[in-house]
């Protein structure tokens, strides 16, 4: 399976190719809400913010996220999947940092050590984060596939420097061994061969031993200690090469890192080792230590590979090792900047192909947490005759109640026992199938949560506001107290909660005299309604938006509507004396008087709701 298909199977398992882009758009549109939900689950005072240039994607109190690109063309599906894999994985990567990285420990200023500290800590905290659930691990695995597929993480080649070989081997080995990321296996296989060409077997054995201990890292401090040990290993490699350089010309015997003479026992051990190496070389085989990767065949011979390097080649190796220790061009070791830059590149590519770039109002999302009976955010006091709306309440209740409280469609099956024979299945008895009796199973009534959302922007002044207030009051009064129906009423701009869930309309009647003011941030209003419905346990969720259909940002409003579909929310538009609503909602009506509401409302939702119930 290639990397793109791997991401698709992780993020959208079982989705048909014909609906993949649509489902991916729903998911992407809901991304800010999903991100906020994940932050809420953390139980910490963490805020989301739109990326505007910090050097890190999190600082332990804030997680920065980028705007969302929403493509429209099927040809962009592959790029979009890579984009979503990176976006989803990066979010989990940052949440892992917030939960498991100790930001009070200062990174080293020494370039190589700084690089190693960030590299090891990145992978360590991700591993801890992924232990909590399969969904978290899937996000990190998807990120790995995207990074390899886009070339952010590349395999080394014969022409790459010692520094690149070392970093590639360490990075891919940790990701395969600790995180189980198969996307990096091919990188590891290549890096392993290249490592054997540049580093002595003593160094490789020591490095693999340290990597084996990385699975037990418990903290950021442990990760930083391991980084120190790896740097010390490189220092030992320099000393080993310097000793090798001082050996007499023509000698092929690798020197140990110590100048002390061998004891008789050590000599015997060395003889045994030499004999074993010769035997392995004759048979063309090499052994593999437990928990370590197999070494290349050059390791089995004492006359090949870096252990026997002499003359100018040895000096070049020493220079490369010293350059590696100096940390020249080593980078910071973190994947954050690399992923973020690639996200921006792909997003721009998608925008160039016609995608919308949506920047969510994260402050509005955080403000969608109005709870309880107090509605201090409501701006009411408009002069409107709400009692005039009562003339349609009876008709609305009579029409809405049967639909909202209807049992789902009966499911007809068959059994080998019963009282009613299914005539069309009699022929089955001749084939040995005794299930000829009809069974009818009627499902339980579906509970419904509803949010009525009103546009109270300045453009709704005058008659539009009067109709809107009366329509809200009429529908709320009609649904008030219906068993199995939970209702809330909200308004935008501002997080105005006119009627909280599980409250009676009569206690909040004055709130329905809503005043027009401000702009038309419809996306914020729909997001507020979505957040309210997300928290409800009712299986059916409905959203009715009353508006003149002219949002401040049409693309953002459409994105917010897409997000409702991700959460299984059915959205309906009620245009107030304007048919502009048809450009936003698939299901819509237009009313010019509250008296038109019963017939037109039912004409819009009756068939839709019955299909949902079935």
Image (tube, rainbow, N blue to C red):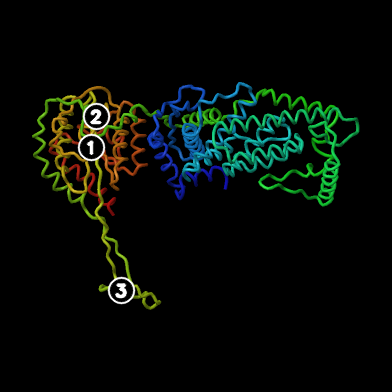
Q: Whole-Å distance between the Cαs marked 2 and 1? A: 12 Å
Looking at the image, is 492 positioned above or below residue 4? above
For the residues bearing labels 1 and 3, Cβ distance under 8 angstroms: no
Residue topped by disc 2: 496
Residue topped by disc 1: 452
Near-viewer residue (429 or 366): 366
Residue topped by disc 3: 417
Callout 2: few (<14), some (14-19), or many (20+) C-alpha neighbours within 10 Å?
many
Q: Whole-Å distance between the Cαs marked 1 and 3? A: 48 Å
Residue 565, position as x, y percentages in the image: 35, 42
Sequence-first tag of 2 and 1: 1
Image-based side of 105 in relation to 381, left or right = right
At x 45%, y 50%, the residue is: 14
Near-viewer residue (145 or 321): 321
User: Residue 156 appears in which quarter of the rendering?
Assistant: top right
SS label for mark 3:
loop
Residue 216, position as x, y percentages in the image: 58, 40
Whether residue 354 can be seen here = yes
């Amino acid at each position: 399976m290639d990397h793109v298909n791997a991401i698709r199977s992780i993020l959208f398992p079982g989705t048909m190719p014909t609906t993949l882009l649509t489902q991916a758009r729903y998911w992407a549109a809901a991304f800010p809400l999903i991100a906020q939900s994940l932050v809420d689950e953390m139980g910490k005072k963490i805020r989301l913010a739109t990326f505007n240039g910090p050097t890190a994607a999190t600082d332990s109190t804030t997680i920065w996220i980028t705007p969302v690109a929403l493509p429209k063309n099927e040809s962009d599906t592959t790029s979009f999947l890579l984009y979503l894999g990176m976006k989803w994985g990066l979010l989990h990567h940052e949440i892992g940092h917030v939960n498991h990285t100790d930001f009070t420990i200062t990174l080293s200023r020494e370039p190589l050590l700084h690089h190693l500290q960030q590299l090891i800590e990145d992978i360590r905290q991700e591993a801890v984060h992924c232990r909590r659930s399969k969904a978290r691990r899937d996000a990190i695995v998807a990120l790995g596939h995207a990074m390899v597929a886009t070339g952010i993480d590349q395999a080394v080649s014969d022409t790459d420097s010692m520094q690149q070989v070392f970093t590639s081997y360490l990075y891919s080995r940790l990701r395969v061994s600790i995180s189980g990321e198969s996307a990096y296996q091919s990188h590891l296989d290549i890096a392993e061969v290249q490592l054997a060409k540049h580093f002595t077997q003593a160094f490789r054995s020591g490095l693999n031993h340290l990597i084996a201990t990385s699975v037990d890292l418990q903290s950021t401090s442990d990760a930083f200690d391991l980084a120190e040990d790896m740097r010390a290993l490189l220092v030992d490699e320099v000393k080993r090469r310097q000793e090798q350089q001082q050996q007499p010309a023509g000698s092929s015997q690798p020197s140990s890192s110590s100048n002390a003479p061998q004891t008789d026992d050590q000599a015997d051990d060395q003889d045994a080792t030499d004999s074993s190496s010769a035997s392995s070389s004759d048979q063309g085989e090499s052994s593999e230590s437990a928990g370590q990767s197999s070494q290349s065949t050059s390791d089995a011979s004492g006359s090949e590979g870096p252990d026997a390097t002499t003359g100018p080649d040895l000096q070049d190796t020493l220079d490369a090792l010293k350059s590696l220790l100096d940390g020249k061009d080593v980078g910071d070791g973190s994947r954050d900047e690399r992923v973020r830059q690639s996200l921006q590149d792909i997003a721009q590519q998608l925008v160039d192909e016609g995608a919308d770039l949506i920047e969510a109002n994260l402050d509005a999302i955080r403000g969608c947490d109005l709870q309880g009976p107090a509605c201090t955010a409501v701006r009411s006091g408009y002069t409107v005759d709400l009692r005039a709306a009562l003339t349609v309440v009876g008709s609305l209740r009579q029409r809405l109640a049967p639909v909202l409280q209807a049992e789902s469609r009966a499911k007809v099956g068959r059994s080998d026992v019963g009282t009613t024979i299914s005539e069309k299945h009699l022929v089955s008895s001749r084939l040995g199938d005794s299930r000829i009796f009809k069974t009818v199973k009627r499902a339980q009534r579906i509970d419904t949560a509803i949010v009525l959302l009103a546009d109270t922007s300045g453009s709704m002044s005058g008659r539009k506001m009067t109709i809107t207030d009366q329509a809200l009051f009429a529908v709320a009064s009609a649904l008030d107290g219906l068993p199995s129906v939970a209702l809330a009423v909200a308004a935008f701009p501002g997080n105005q909660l006119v009627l909280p869930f599980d409250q009676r309309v009569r206690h909040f009647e004055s709130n329905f005299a809503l005043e027009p003011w401000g702009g038309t941030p419809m996306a914020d209003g729909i997001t507020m309604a979505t957040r309210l419905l997300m928290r409800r346990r009712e299986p059916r969720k409905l959203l009715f938006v009353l508006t003149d259909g002219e949002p401040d940002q049409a693309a953002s409003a459409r994105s917010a509507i897409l997000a409702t579909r991700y959460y299984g929310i059915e959205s309906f538009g009620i245009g107030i004396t304007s048919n502009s609503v048809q450009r936003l909602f698939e299901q819509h009506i237009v009313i010019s008087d509250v008296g038109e509401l019963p017939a037109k409302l039912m004409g819009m939702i009756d068939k839709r709701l019955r299909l949902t119930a079935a």
